[in-house]
Image (cartoon, rainbow, N blue to C red):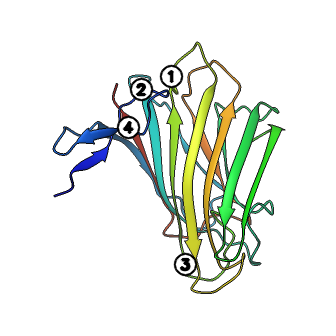
Amino acid sequence: MPLITTLANGSARGYGGLLAAGATSSYESIQTLTPSGGAASASFTSIPSTYKHLQIRGIVHDDYATDKAPNAGFDLNLIFNSDSAANYSNHYLYGNGTSAVAAGASGSSIINLPGTNQISTANYMSVLIIDIIDYADTTKYKTVRTFNGADANGTGTTNRCVALNSGSWRSTSAINTIKINAWGTGFVAGTQFALYGIKA
């Protein structure tokens, strides 16, 4: 039995603290999406405002035909509440077993998730966890952090990657819709996203 587990219901300020093992789970399933093969996007809609934070867990692949290095523009991305204006910022750190790169951008029209979808090899899936902090708070901008990776049993930037990303949506509106966009024509069958609410 582990001695500690991650604190799921900490505030944005204390998020990632420690909790004694055996504490009651703070996660509740809200919705699961299984996009059909070829679907260009998947959307969580009518998200209730009754939680403190949100978390998305995904297993994903799209049908883009050419391997791309992380942050080459061929990654998943998020849009909140159908806002496609330049109201997002992104920061990322990723490595491929050979080198590590850090970068950032402001004035974006998306939350970009580098390293999630750059492998074209069939049957290899990327995995990701996305935390959306204080998503329903109408007094502050929204903060996003992600941890994701992929491995096609090879070497180099186009065959494996692990990435830590953060971003913000400069809006005080409560998030009620999250759209996840694929690159290429669309998602490959077997892709799945699960949305969880984290209780206060």
The correct choice, above or below, for 130 with respect to 132 in the image is below
Q: Quick one: 191 or 95, which is closer to the camera?
A: 95
Which is nearer the N-term, disc 3 or disc 2?
Answer: 2
Give the percent coordinates (x, y) of residue 152.
59, 82
Q: Secondary structure at mark 3?
A: loop
Which is nearer the N-term, disc 4 or disc 1?
Answer: 4
At label 4, the amino acid type is Gly
- Point out the image quarter for the C terminus: top left
At label 3, the amino acid type is Tyr
Q: Quick one: 44 or 173, which is closer to the camera?
A: 173
Q: CA distance from mark 1 to mark 3?
A: 35 Å
Q: Pointer 1: what residue?
A: 136
Q: Pointer 3: what residue?
A: 124
Number of the label disc, if any, that sits on residue 52: 2
Give the percent coordinates (x, y) of residue 85.
81, 32
Direction from residue 103 to residue 22 in the image, left or right: left
Looking at the image, is mark 4 or mark 3 nearer the viewer? 4
- CB within 8 Å, label 1 to label 2: yes
Few, some or many C-alpha atoms within 10 Å of disc 3 (few <14, some 14-19, many ≥20)?
Answer: some
Direction from residue 74 to residue 154 in the image, left or right: left
Q: CA distance from mark 1 to mark 2?
A: 7 Å
Q: Pointer 4: what residue?
A: 17
Direction from residue 105 to residue 113 in the image, left or right: left
Q: Secondary structure at mark 2?
A: loop
Looking at the image, is mark 3 or mark 2 nearer the viewer? 2
Q: CA distance from mark 3 to mark 2?
A: 33 Å
Which is nearer the N-term, disc 1 or disc 2?
Answer: 2
- CB within 8 Å, label 4 to label 1: no
- CB within 8 Å, label 2 to label 4: no
The correct choice, above or below, for 122 with respect to 114 in the image is below
Which is nearer the N-term, disc 4 or disc 3?
Answer: 4
Q: CA distance from mark 2 to mark 4?
A: 15 Å
